[in-house]
Image (cartoon, coloured by chain):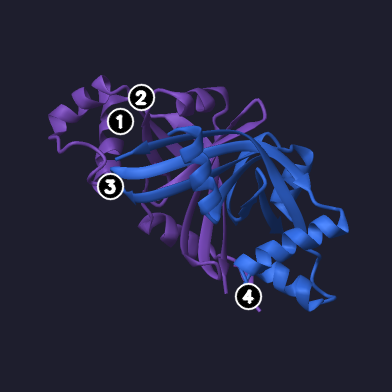
Chain colours: A purple, B blue
Amino acid sequence: MLEVKDMAQGEMVALLLRGKLGHLGCSRDGHPYVVPMHYAYDGECLFFFTTEGTKTEFIAANHEVCFQVEEITDVSRWLSVMVFGRAERVTKPDETERAMQFITGRNPTLTPALNETKIGKWKRLNNVVVYRVRPHSIHGRKTA
Amino acid sequence: MSKEESLALLRASRLARLGCVADGEPYVVPVNYVFDDECAISHSLPGRKITAMRAHPRVCLQVDEVADQFHWKSVLAYGTFEELKNPDERARALGLLLSLFPRLTPVESFIAGDASAPAPIAYRIRIDRVTGIMEG
């Protein structure tokens, strides 16, 4: 019989470090909202960026988010980790720059190939908002 | 995406992320499901998502098909959680799930009549709104 177990802390961190695409869950006035999202995790915080829109409105109304990352081979072989935390806008120019480099470094085709001085301009033109999530809890389950 | 295209992806897919609200905070978990008569049918052992949905039945299901970063579809279906408590409805739902996912544990233990296992909960999400976006 198939068994589902809790993942150890190290296994969850390893999965978050090797993953690139997850699902961001937000909620506002009791309504959930889920979208696929590329991200980068540095072992402490999770970073992602998006453009101004529904996601930024949801996050502005409720900063608490759930970021879910999985590796699914099939119905009976999978791992899934959920990160709970507060999504905060990264606003300082040097921090934003660093976060963008980090995310696009993990996901090289997300942005046009830009050099460092042009990323700032591209970001402004596209109304890009960068978020950092410092997890207050992480949970993971996997098949045995 | 048109409503028809979005519904087509929702009908064809077997894996969704269920988004619900647990104590005012979002909660996202992958689930296997089958689409039947405007509803997504799934099951679960008792736990946090069931507690959350019982307290707050407004949920969403997100389904995607990602080929690469430039070719993808993502559908978001909003609906209401309904627990299938009627024995006939519950048996039909679990039977449908078992036929598609023969190796799923809770159904297996239900069928096997394992007395020590907690009874799986069968539920449906009655979909009332669907949106979809795509690229490529």
State how far apart marks 4 and 3 are (Cα): 34 Å
- Circles 1 and 4 in contact, beta carbons < 8 Å: no
Among numbered discs 4 and 3, the one appearing first in the sequence: 4
Amino acid type for the residue under numbered disc 4:
Leu
- Circles 1 and 2 in contact, beta carbons < 8 Å: yes
State how far apart marks 1 and 4 are (Cα): 44 Å
User: Which image quarter is the N terminus of chain B in?
Assistant: top left
The residue that mark 2 highlights is A91
> Local crowd at mark 2 within 10 Å, few (<14), some, or many (≥20)?
few
Give SS at disc 1.
helix
The residue that mark 3 highlights is A107
B95 relative to A36, above or below = below
Q: Residue at x 28, y 47 (%)?
A: A107
Among numbered discs 1 and 4, the one appearing first in the sequence: 4
State how far apart marks 4 and 2 are (Cα): 46 Å
State how far apart marks 1 and 2 are (Cα): 6 Å
State how far apart marks 2 and 3 are (Cα): 21 Å
A101 relative to B48, above or below = above
B94 relative to B136, above or below = below
Amino acid type for the residue under numbered disc 1:
Thr
The residue that mark 4 highlights is A2
Q: Quadrant of residue B130?
A: top right
User: Which image quarter is the C terminus of chain B in?
Assistant: top left
Residue mark closest to the camera, 2 vs 3: 3
The residue that mark 1 highlights is A96
Labels 4 and 3 positioned on one and the same chain: yes
Of residues A13 and B52, which is closer to you in this image?
Answer: B52
Subunit bearing disc 4: A
